[in-house]
Amino acid sequence: MADKISAVKGMNDVLPPQSGDWEWLEGIVRALMQRHAYKNIRTPIVEPTGLFVRGLGEITDIVEKEMYSFTDRLNGEELTLRPENTAGVVRATIEHAMLYEGGKRLYYMGPMFRHERPQRGRYRQFHQIGAEALGFGGPEVDAEIILLAHQLWKDLGLKDVRLELNSLGQLPERQAHRSALIAYLEQHQDQLDADAKRRLHTNPLRILDTKNPELQSLVNQAPILMDFLGPDSLDHFNRLRQMLDVCQIPYQINPRLVRGMDYYNLTVFEFITDSLGSQGTICGGGRYDSLIEQLGGKPAPAIGWAMGVERVIELLREQQLLPTEPHPDVYAIVGEAKDLPQVLVHLQTLRAAGLSVQMHASPRTEWSNMKAQFKKADSSGATYALIFGPEELQQGVVARKPLRDGKQAQDTIALDNLAQWASHLQSTAH
Ligand code: ATP
Ligand code: MG
């Protein structure tokens, strides 16, 4: 046999029955987005590398070391598999002048790519569901988009998800804080690790985001950005807080919350759970009022979040909230191969009425015997077996055998009544 080829490390296949969990989650998200008037957007998985370099900032983990970038062999273009989708959504809104008539509320679902060390809750291809509200500047949209995520946890039944909130203010406020932060960190140079030393003069704010436990106490005593916010930033933050309070959305203010991308300002937030170990952030987001202009668009404010699908699914599994695997309503057993054409017609009738129907299919060229078919019917988990035997078909009927209700007896049903029975079953069982 030929050598097997395996999937790329850190990139997972999602197989049945787990793929059913994904579809279930996606269905709940679609309904939620529809209720909040957010519309679906689908942008390419490959974008020009410059989009992310300009959008995320050069001195970020993602751009420095996590991007799958390559040169197109055929035309020399510099391309990157998207590590996140806010930059792509912003590029699309600019390219198609989508904000021309006012703001847009958008959502997406799909794979993202980051070259990280694979571990629980951290993969190289992973999936995000994201929401973006572009062209709105007021804190009411900050509240709306946080409520949207909060409602998703509610719709899914998730417990133990907490909201952390912070304000990053505006650029001059961050610059004043930055100077104070650099002065503080310079006083403690000897305690910094290599990463932090390198970032001290390029991106000191990111040092606060460090995952190194040895830096925690140093970071905890550093100057706080909140203390540098001017009246407008504080007002935006306080109005958001008031709206969340009235809506009874609990949150904690975390002055160290800075997030991984450079483009954020004012509101930033994360939804965190303690049940997933160190990969506990299931959703993160914030305002990015300068990104649209930075990517060549007419200046417009925006806010968004992205959640990690793998982490949310794992949390759902942990809390035993995933749906049970659905079984077919009907497994079709066929006595003789010559009857297959007309059986196919009857099965389409059942499916048209909404039933889930699995047809027996032979693994070989000769048709399966009845015993083998009954075995398959039993293991399919179907509610009924319909037995299309040659005598029954001749009489215009089919045998109907309940597979899961031992008390119900086998009987026959007229082929002409199949559609009616299917509708009845559909309306009672589902
Ligand atoms: P982290 O601090 O865990 O690296 P991040 O700040 O890089 O997260 P974002 O870029 O904000 O994450 O992405 C939003 C969400 O996407 C995260 O909260 C997380 O749930 C998920 N996520 C990010 N990177 C990965 C990954 N490599 N594998 C799986 N999920 C991920
Ligand atoms: Mg990361």
Image: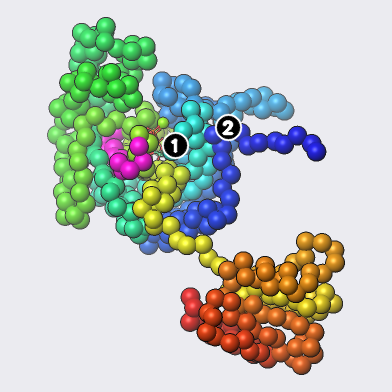
- Residue 134 is situated, as x and y percent measured from the top left of the image, at 38, 45
Residue at point 30%, 41% (across, down): 274
Q: Quadrant of the rendered structure where residue 79 is? A: top right
Closer to the camera in the image, 376 or 198: 376
Looking at the rendering, in which quadrant would you find the N terminus?
A: top right
Query: Marks 2 and 1, how far apart in space?
Result: 13 Å
Residue occupying the point 82% across, 69% down:
367
Question: Is residue 33 something that shows in the picture?
Answer: no
- Vertical relation: 377 (above or below) 233: below
Q: x%, y% of residue 148?
A: 33, 53
**Badge 1 amino acid:** Arg
Residue at disc 1, secondary structure: loop
37 sits to left or right of 51: left
Q: Position of residue 228 (x, y in %)?
A: 17, 26
Say what amino acid the circle numbered 2 marks: Lys
Q: Which residue is mark 1?
A: 120
**Reading the chain from its start, which is encountered first: label 2 or label 1?**
2
- Is residue 386 shown in magenta? no
**Camera-side residue of 416 and 142:** 416
Location of mark 2 (residue): 9
Residue 221 picture quarter: top left
